[in-house]
Amino acid sequence: MPWGELCALLEPYYPKAGNARPPVGVKRMLRIYFLQQWFNLSDPAVEEALYDSAVMRQVVGIDLGQEPVPDETTACKFRHLLEAHGLGGEILQAVNQYLQSRGVKITTGTIVDATIIHAPSSTKNGDQKRDPEMHQTKKGKQWYFGMKAHVGVDSKTKMIHSVVATAANAADGRVLPELLHGEETKVWGDQAYRGQSEVIQEVAPAAQDMTHKRYRYKKRIDEVERAKNRTKSRVGSKVEHVFAVLKLQFRFVKVRYRGLQKNANRLFATLRSGESVYSAPEAAAVPAGVVSPPTP
């Protein structure tokens, strides 16, 4: 992790020492914040984990013989600071630039896809209603409620270079331009991106549209086009490895907070900090995350 660059990014917004209790160092709080993402911990849980785990304290740089662990309120305020200034996307950009400075090369193929992050659909709360920024969508015969994480992934290294967060009912194709970096020669995607050739050409003029084409009609199935789609899936399926890391390793299956902006900030930080952990020798290094407002 490029701690120096990330701390410099946060310093202008971080509280300065004054007459009150001096603030915990920004690097220490940033490490605590990333531990929350890597282990899917709430604010109280990360405080408890730091007391329980000597390894976590070593990562953060805390010696219980000299000082206590920052409490859950401090962790909460730091998270709100990042959310208020939209620093999740800035962190994503900073790590991309760091990778680029280390000789990381961007290849010419991008796979685009989206996954649903669930949100509580219950109305048994103080407001007696669901989160107004989350929406429901139908996938197959099943209805889901929550948000969508849209990603642009390098087709060679499976590294994430673009992230967009929207409500679950947003069409995948609507955010396609924000997932491309413009230098692609091929763009891969499933049926959700069908008919987007003109959009692809506008953003990436040299790109070949490798998204799936329609093969099923009312009274027949085009077996030739179906076979072509299967061949394309051999490359496009790599994006599922990214979602597997997000949901199985980092356990980002459900939203933790109320509202799209807060969860998007967590998404950007999780994907980018996680990418630094499991990155390959070569990785993509381009644009940052975008939060899209919920679709009416």
Image: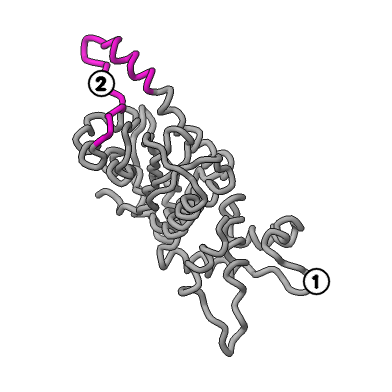
Single out the residue that lies furthest toward the front.
Answer: 103
Residue in view at x 24 percent, y 49 percent: 296
Q: Amino acid at mark 1?
A: Gly
Q: Please tell me the numbered disc located at residue 214.
A: 2
27, 72: nearer the viewer: 27
Queried whether the magenta region covers residue 261, the answer comes back as no
86, 139: nearer the viewer: 86
Residue 52 against residue 231 in the figure, above or below: below
Q: Is residue 21 left or right of residue 267?
A: right
Q: Determine crowd level at label 1: few under 14, some 14-19, many 20+ residues with C-alpha closer than 10 A.
A: few
Q: Position of residue 258 (x, y in %)?
A: 43, 57
Q: Quadrant of residue 117?
A: top left
Query: Looking at the image, what colour scheme do you see?
Result: one colour
Q: Is residue 247 left or right of residue 220?
A: right
Q: Position of residue 289 (x, y in %)?
A: 39, 52
Q: Which residues are magenta?
A: 206-232
75, 236: nearer the viewer: 236
Residue behind mark 1: 65
Residue 94 against residue 20 in the figure, above or below: above
Q: Is residue 223 left or right of residue 259?
A: left
Residue in view at x 77 percent, y 74 percent: 66
Residue in view at x 37 percent, y 22 percent: 232
Q: Amino acid at mark 2?
A: Arg
